[in-house]
Amino acid sequence: MKFAHFAHVWGKPGLTPAQRYHQLWRELELCDELGFDYGFCVEHHFRPDESWSSAPGLYAVGAGARTKRIRLGGMGHVVPLHHPLRLVEEIAVTDQMLDGRLEVGLVPGISPQNFPPFSADYKQRREITLEFVSFLRAAFTDAPSFSFEGKHHHFKNVKLAVNPVQRPHPPLWIETRDPATLEFCAREGINVGYFLVYPREEAAPRYRKYLEQWRAAGHKHKPHIAYSTVVYVDETDEKALSVALHDASQAYRGFFRDASSPEDLKAAQNEHAVMFDERGEPGAAEAMRNLLDPQWLLKNDRILIGSPETVAKKLKAYATEGVFDTFFGEFNFGNLAEDDLLRSIRLFGTEVIPRLKDFEPY
């Protein structure tokens, strides 16, 4: 298995954004020391009450200056919000600054409210994102120039000043559970992933099919499939639950915008749930309705809290059930004290990773 430190870079009461980033660098320095494979962040906008992470390239460069071996990147760049040339330039320069340690996550975006300020097309976001993969591959050329003519990207005789270190390009990821997008990713050799809201037992058939499609495409190596949730490790199960359960149950409170009362909050959760019901995903709808209920999260194994032995055992079972080989652990959530946060990361690195690093779920 592979292991990532995953950060929404939640805003923290009592910390300035600068202080929050210095805390993040301390987390990543420790992860680098302990042998984590990856460090990833999100790209979110316009929510000072939620995430302070709007620039994945800057995150990667800042983290890279403070680490030696961990691979870094955004998970992911919201492609339709960026000028495509500017984004490929940023990817290339970032990979150079990281000496070839960049991983590139690409996402179409979820929140409609992020699109109007960028004059971006929400309805065409998936098409724009998938076409960008071909554009990126065309742009990273050793030829004197490149041209590209697609439905959404049109360029003639352009030459980038800098190509990435990794050729033909850094590894690509698209976090998705959409069958058509999974088929595209399998064909194009792109890693994928999903989030705790989607039940693992419902996810498994889709990702098994993705693996079949990957093999049929003739790729010579295995893909990575990621799974993301909050994780907290302490000396005993009892201590871990007493320290972190409440904060873990509130980790994703920021998803529900403008909920100022319990009634507003329930209405916001139900609004999200209805969207998943309409997509034919009742398990995800149930999760959204219960995302802030600590007992529901524990009973349904949606969060990882416990001793190293418990977390390793559960994570192995999750990976087997959910068909993933890469764990995106959100270690910093809620109002965890930094001493507890760093102890959790250290215990995960020294006692959980060694138990699972040779385990191959597929």
Image (spheres, rainbow, N blue to C red):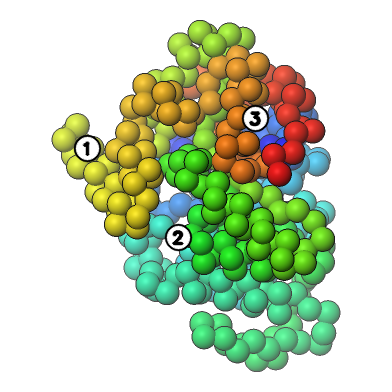
Q: Nearer the viewer, mark 3 or mark 2?
A: 3
Q: Name the amino acid, label 2.
A: Gly
Rendered location of residue 48, percent (x, y):
38, 44
| Rendered image: mark on residue 316 | 3
The residue under the point 41% across, 57% down is 110
Label at residue 178: none
Residue 61: x %, y % from top left:
69, 50
Which of the 4 image quadrants contains residue 34?
top right
Does any portion of residue 299 appear in the rendered image?
Answer: yes
Residue 116 occupies quadrant? bottom left
Identify which residue, 65 or 141, lies in the foreground.
141
Q: Which residue matches tag 2?
A: 109
Q: Amino acid at mark 3?
A: Lys
Q: Residue at x 24, y 44 (%)?
A: 270
Tell me the number on the disc at residue 266. 1
Residue shown at 18%/39% (left/top)? 264
Q: Nearer the viewer, residue 204 or 22?
A: 204
Q: Secondary structure at mark 3?
A: helix
Secondary structure under the numbered disc 1 in the rendered image: helix
Q: Is residue 258 visible?
A: no
